[in-house]
């Protein structure tokens, strides 16, 4: 088996009209394709190429039913997602009845020359915006999925949400690994309590999980 089922055009052909935002519940084609690839003979290079293709269509992190249910349970007032990319996680959350405001500094179709604007898939509406709106609706959980390690984006978003009175942070990534800068992790440890650490489907060599943090009521720890 080669990795041709995971190139861009093959995947879009297979999922067909599901990619049209909001028409009907999506299911979870990313999880299905990941499971299919995992079921093939182990080949690190093939997996690397499959991952590179699929994260450009869907997202860096792979959601499953437990992940979506966990976010919903901890976000009764909804979610504001910064760095939403294609909007894949936002779409699954919306299908599950969660109110989602999804934003990205370079959403699909924005023509800014950034990461996502050339991608042919947008799973739901993603507005153009970044950390400047992270504190706009502090009653919502702040959600960050695979924020870049080489950027202060996650830290600034957290500070804005926190400063506006936000209490819940959903962080999908690696703890002190490939995602978010060290200041972001320090702030979470000091001002928040980790209440969930849920493993999610992973590509080999990655250790991302879904973490939920609730703001400490007694002041900073330590």
Image (spheres, rainbow, N blue to C red):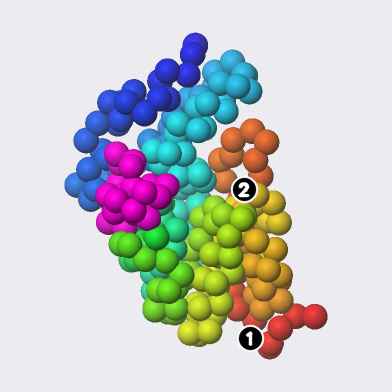
Q: Viewed as shown, does residue 21 lie left or right of 164?
A: left
Q: What x and y, as percent, mark residue 66?
A: 50, 50
Whether the magenta-drawn stretch holds residue 111 is answered as yes
Q: Which mark is residue 217?
A: 1
Residue 94, magenta (yes or no): no
Q: Residue at x 37, y 66 (%)?
A: 129
- 90 and 117: which is toward the camera: 117
Residue 147 higher or lower than 7, as above or below: below
Is residue 39 left or right of 103 when viewed as pictured?
right
User: Quick check: 132 left or right of 222?
Assistant: left
Q: Label 1: state its secondary structure.
A: loop
Where residue 14 sits, quadrant-wise, is top left
Of all residues, the one furthest to the top in this rendering is 1
In the rendered view, tell whether residue 175 sits above or below residue 35: below
How many C-alpha atoms fall within 10 Å of the one at disc 2: few (<14), some, or many (≥20)?
many
Q: Nearer the viewer, residue 168 or 149?
A: 149
Q: Name the mark on residue 145.
A: none
Disc number placed over residue 208 in the picture, else none: 2
> How many numbered callouts?
2
Residue 153, position as x, y percentages in the image = 54, 64
**Residue farthest along the bottom direction in this orientation:** 218
Secondary structure beneath label 2: loop
Residue drawn 57% across and 55% down? 148
Q: Main secondary structure of the magenta part?
A: loop
Side of 125 where 89 appears, left or right:
right
Earlier sequence position, callout 2 versus callout 1: 2
Using the image, determine if residue 44 lies above or below residue 124: above
The answer to whether the residue labelled 2 contacts the one labelled 1, judged by CB atoms less than 8 Å apart, is no
Q: Nearer the viewer, mark 2 or mark 1?
A: 2
Residue 28 appearing in the image: yes
Instruction: Say few, some or many: other residues with alpha carbon within 10 Å of mark 1 (under 14 / 14 to 19 / 20 or more).
Output: few
From which residue to which does the magenta span run? 106-126
């Amino acid at each position: 088996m080669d990795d041709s089922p995971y190139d861009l055009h093959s995947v879009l052909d297979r999922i067909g009209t599901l990619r049209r935002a909001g028409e009907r519940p999506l299911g979870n084609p990313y999880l299905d394709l990941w499971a299919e690839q995992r079921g093939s003979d182990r080949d690190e290079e093939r997996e690397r190429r499959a991952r590179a293709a699929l994260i450009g269509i869907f997202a860096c992190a792979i959601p499953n039913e437990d992940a979506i249910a966990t976010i919903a349970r901890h976000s009764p007032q909804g979610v504001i997602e910064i760095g939403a990319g294609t909007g894949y996680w936002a779409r699954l959350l919306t299908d599950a009845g969660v109110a989602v405001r999804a934003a990205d500094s370079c959403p699909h179709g924005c023509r800014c020359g950034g990461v996502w604007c050339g991608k042919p898939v947008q799973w739901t509406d993603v507005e153009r915006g970044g950390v400047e709106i992270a504190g706009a609706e502090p009653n919502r959980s702040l959600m960050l999925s695979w924020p870049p390690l080489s950027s202060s984006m996650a830290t600034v978003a957290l500070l804005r949400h926190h400063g506006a009175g936000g209490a819940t942070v959903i962080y999908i990534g690696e703890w002190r690994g490939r995602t978010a800068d060290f200041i972001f992790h320090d702030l979470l440890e000091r001002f928040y309590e980790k209440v969930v650490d849920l493993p999610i489907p992973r590509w080999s060599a990655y250790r991302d999980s879904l973490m939920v943090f609730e703001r400490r009521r007694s002041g900073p720890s330590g």
